[in-house]
Image: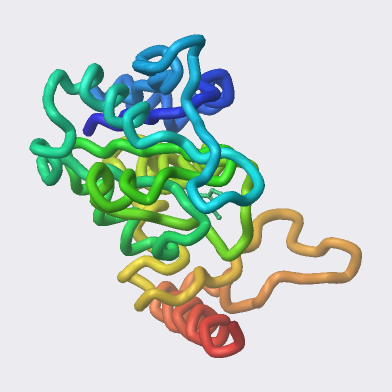
Amino acid sequence: MKIDVFTLFPGWFEFFEGQRHVRNAVELGHELTVVDLRSTTPLRAGQVDDTPYGGGAGMVLRVDVVEAALRVRWDTDPVEGRGSRRVVALSASGRPFDDALASELAGEDEVALLCGRYEGFDERVHEHLATDVVSIGPYVLAGGELAAMVVCDAVLRKLPGALGHESSAVEESFSPALGGAPEYPQYTRPADWRGHGVPAVLSSGDHARVRAWRLEQSRQRADSG
Ligand code: ADE
C-alpha cells in the first residue's frame, strides 16, 4: 500500500521511518511518503494558515494550501478525484480511531494522512478533500503528527510480513480473533519473580486448557474495562 503523510513538520517522521516494522513494510514494497505542506503553498513567504472568520484565538490551516499539496502530489484535482483513495484528516473532533478502522485502512491501496496544526483545518478540508476525519482520543494534541504516526503504526503492523512473525497481529487486543476484547495476560521467565508466580495452567502443556484460560481472561478484561 501507499501512505502519503501531509504535514508542516516532516522532521517529526524521520525517527518513525527508521523503526523496524516500518522498514520491514517498505522492504516488502509498501511506500511511506512524507510531504511538506509548506513546499507547495500557493501563498507568498510560505504562508499556510490564516486568522479564523468570526474571530477567535489561533490560526486555521487554509483549504487552498491543502488542496495545492494534494494536487501536486497526485497530479490530479483532489476534489474531483475524491474517493479514489482514503484521505484521513486527523482532528480531535473526528471519529474515534479503533482496531476495526486500522484493519479497514490496511486493506486500502492508498491512504493519505493530513496533519493539522494550530486550530486545525478550515472545515472545507473535512468536507471536500478528506474522506474521513479521525481522532485518536478525546484530548487535543498540538498537531496531527503524533496522531498520524499512531494511525500509521497501527495500520503498518497489520500488513502481512511487517511484524516478522505472522500470528502476533492476529490474536491481539481488540482483534476479531478475541471477539474485540483486550488481549489475555502474557508471562515469560523467570517463573518466580519476588514471590509472584505464573498461572500453573500456562506450564501444563495442555493447549486446550491454555486456550480456554486465555479466552476467559480476555473476556474478564472486557467485562471489567
Ligand atoms: N489533532 C489534535 N488533537 C488530535 C487528536 N486527539 N486526534 C487526532 N488529531 C488531533
Extreme residue in the front direction: 54
Question: Picture coordinates of residue 145 (x, y %)?
Answer: 53, 36
Which residue occupies the foreground of this view, 135 or 202?
135
Left or right side of 78 for 7: right
**Quarter location, residue 161:** top left
Left or right side of 201 for 172: left
**Quarter location, residue 87:** top left
Left or right side of 85 for 191: right
Residue drawn at (46%, 37%) of the image: 115
Question: Picture coordinates of residue 186 (x, y %)?
Answer: 60, 64
Question: Picture coordinates of residue 153 (x, y %)?
Answer: 45, 41
Residue drawn at (58%, 25%) of the image: 12
Which residue occupies the foreground of this view, 128 or 166?
128
**Quarter location, residue 122:** top left
130 lies above or below 175: above
Which residue occupies the foreground of this view, 104 or 34?
34
Residue 164 in view, yes or no: no
Residue drawn at (32%, 30%) of the image: 64
Residue drawn at (44%, 83%) of the image: 212
Left or right side of 71 for 102: right
Residue 116 in view, yes or no: yes
Image quadrant occupied by the N terminus: top left
Image quadrant occupied by the C terminus: bottom right
